[in-house]
């Protein structure tokens, strides 16, 4: 049993948490601005204003750091999803998350890394399934609340379509291709409005 005063142990724990958080925040910023290839222990240390040895103290390998960073980014994303799902119009709020052009940069970097990182690839797949489960639950609830048939509007199909359409629009936006975007957005938002409002012609 440790003989150090409790205050000293708490102080060290706080310091450790702050250092680890600073390391992950620095890695995230570098990856977001320059891509994962630019992330190194030296760059992270400089960005976080820490000694480079501390990066290796908290993360034995860069693979370990990238996995921790993915989990950190994942929890930030799911906090956004939870807020969207709890809103008065959850489908509209979830669709807004799908269309956010600022979020996917890190996702693209993680997907690129996953081609040669088996553990990360598995985590990305798990997170994708988790994302769809949130969408499905909120879609099913909205349909039920408005008397809309899930046979006519399968929640999983809608979840995949919303998520996929959002990714495609963002990918196009990155390339500067916008043909058809306004029409797709208007179409999806009309359907969401009908589903959340329980339009009579959607009741079965």
Image (cartoon, grey):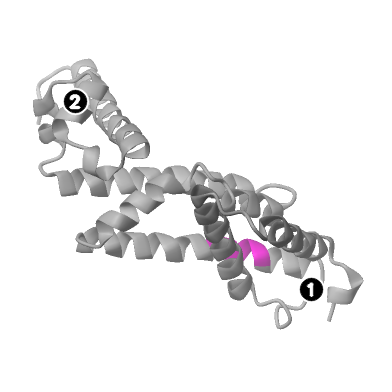
Q: Quadrant of residue 91?
A: bottom right
Q: Earlier in the sequence, mark 2 or mark 1?
A: 2
Of residues 23 and 173, the one drawn nearer to the viewer in this rendering: 173
- Is residue 88 highlighted in magenta? no
Q: What stretch is highlighted in magenta?
A: 134-139
Query: Who's the residue at 22% across and 29% down the image?
Result: 44
Question: Considering only vertical position in the picture, is 18 above or below 28?
Answer: above
Name the residue at 12% across, 19% down: 4
Residue 198 in the image, given as x and y percentages of width and height: 84, 66
Image mark for residue 45: 2
Q: Quadrant of residue 47?
A: top left
The residue carrying pointer 1 sits among few (fewer than 14), some (14 to 19) or many (20 or more) residues within 10 Å by Cα, namely many
Circle 2 — which element?
A: helix
Q: In this view, does 138 lie to the left or right of 37?
A: right
Along the line of sight, the residue nearer the viewer: 167 or 60: 167
Picture disc at residue 160: none
Q: How many marks?
A: 2
Q: Which residue is the site of mark 1?
A: 148
Asked which secondary structure carries label 1, the reply is: loop
């Amino acid at each position: 049993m440790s003989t150090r005063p409790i205050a000293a142990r708490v102080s060290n724990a706080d310091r450790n948490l702050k250092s680890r958080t600073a390391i992950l925040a620095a890695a995230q910023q570098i990856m977001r601005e320059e891509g994962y290839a630019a992330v190194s222990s030296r760059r992270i240390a400089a960005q976080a204003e820490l000694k480079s040895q501390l990066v290796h103290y908290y993360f034995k390998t860069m693979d370990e750091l990238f996995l921790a960073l993915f989990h950190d980014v994942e929890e930030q994303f799911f906090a956004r999803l939870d807020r969207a799902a709890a809103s008065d119009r959850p489908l509209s709020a979830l669709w807004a998350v799908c269309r956010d052009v600022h979020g996917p940069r890190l996702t693209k970097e993680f997907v690129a890394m996953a081609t040669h990182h088996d553990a990360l690839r598995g985590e990305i797949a798990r997170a994708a399934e988790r994302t769809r489960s949130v969408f499905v639950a909120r879609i099913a609830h909205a349909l039920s609340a408005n008397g809309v048939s899930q046979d006519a509007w399968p929640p999983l199909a809608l979840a995949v379509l919303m998520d996929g359409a959002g990714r495609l629009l963002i990918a196009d936006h990155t390339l500067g291709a916008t043909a058809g975007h306004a029409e797709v957005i208007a179409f999806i938002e009309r359907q969401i409005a009908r589903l959340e409002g329980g339009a009579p012609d959607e009741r079965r």
